[in-house]
Amino acid sequence: DTGVSQDPRHKITKRGQNVTFRCDPISEHNRLYWYRQTLGQGPEFLTYFQNEAQLEKSRLLSDRFSAERPKGSFSTLEIQRTEQGDSAMYLCASSLVQGGVGEQYFGPGTRLTVT
Amino acid sequence: AQSVTQLDSQVPVFEEAPVELRCNYSSSVSVYLFWYVQYPNQGLQLLLKYLSGSTLVESINGFEAEFNKSQTSFHLRKPSVHISDTAEYFCAVSRTGGGNKLTFGTGTQLKVEL
């Protein structure tokens, strides 16, 4: 299976620590998205990349958050100085868009718990 | 900006009964519409989508949804549900011509009982 993978699947950290998540998209997909999902809510858009360029960031993405997609392949999402409010499921999705709408394929997510 | 409302947080239904999961959206521009399903302990999967053309779209497992522009709705229906349909269902929209980022509703938990 060559779907979207995310690592780690679970992360428990203490408030104030930095964490980094990784997403490996489906090979040759040119777009990569990050979403955040809290309990009882639907996923909320954070940011997306077209190849290696970060084209849009949500207001939810405070300056403690940074995302990269070097060489247009895998992506990392880093949260600095974590807060309890950062506890959520972080979802990654990828799609192949060629002039139209590409279906987004989601990974299993990384569940972050900040204690 | 777009928004999605799923009024029903939980829908219990008996097996082989019909079901409708409601979705209404708000947008000042044209949108694409999607239904995603999340089975227990699995990731989100696309169930069906409306991009253009026929307003009635179908999935391979018997679900269908109809785009109603005047009522800004995209309700999901199935004439006869199975135990295996138990899952959380999310309605989502993205504006046409944008980066295809999705705006999701809060989800509806469908619980199929014997």
Image: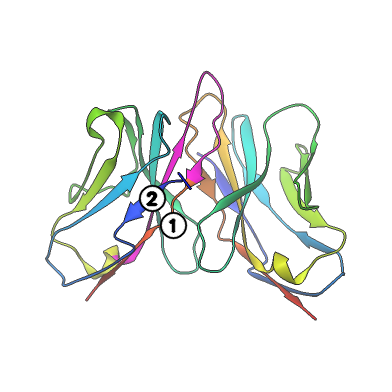
Secondary structure, mark 2, is strand
How is the protein colored in the picture? Answer: rainbow
Q: What percent of the width, then of the height, locates residue B86?
A: 68, 69
The residue under the point 57% across, 55% down is B105
Is residue A91 left or right of A100 when viewed as pictured?
left
Q: Name the residue under label 1.
A: A108
Q: How many callouts does the rendering have?
A: 2
Q: Which amino acid does label 1 sit on?
A: Pro
Residue A2 belongs to the span the image colors magenta: no
User: Depth check: A8 or B4 in front?
Assistant: A8
Task: Give the image location of residue B53, x and y in percent.
Answer: 77, 26
Dot 2: chain letter? A
Q: As rendered, which of A42 and B47 lies closer to the eye?
A: B47
**Which type of secondary structure does the marked residue at label 1 adopt?**
loop
Q: In this view, does A88 lie to the left or right of B36?
A: left
Mark 1, chain letter? A
Quadrant the C terminus of chain A occupies: bottom left
Q: Report which quarter residue A81 is drawn in.
A: bottom left
User: Callout 2, which amino acid?
Assistant: Ser
- Assess whether residue A96 is covered by the magenta stretch: yes
C-alpha distance separating marks 2 and 1 = 7 Å
**For the residues bearing labels 2 and 1, Cβ distance under 8 angstroms:** yes
- Residue A100 figure quarter: top right
The residue segment tinted magenta is A87-105
Have a look at marks 2 and 1 and say if they share a chain.
yes
On residue A5, the disc is: 2
Residue A19 coordinates in the image, percent (x, y): 18, 58
Identity of the residue furthest to the front in this view: A1
Q: Residue at x 16, y 72 (%)?
A: A14
Position of residue B18 relative to residue A107, above or below, is below
- Residue B70 percent coordinates (x, y): 78, 38
Q: Characterize the local packing of mark 2: few (<14), some (14-19) or many (20 or more) Cα atoms within 10 angstroms.
A: many
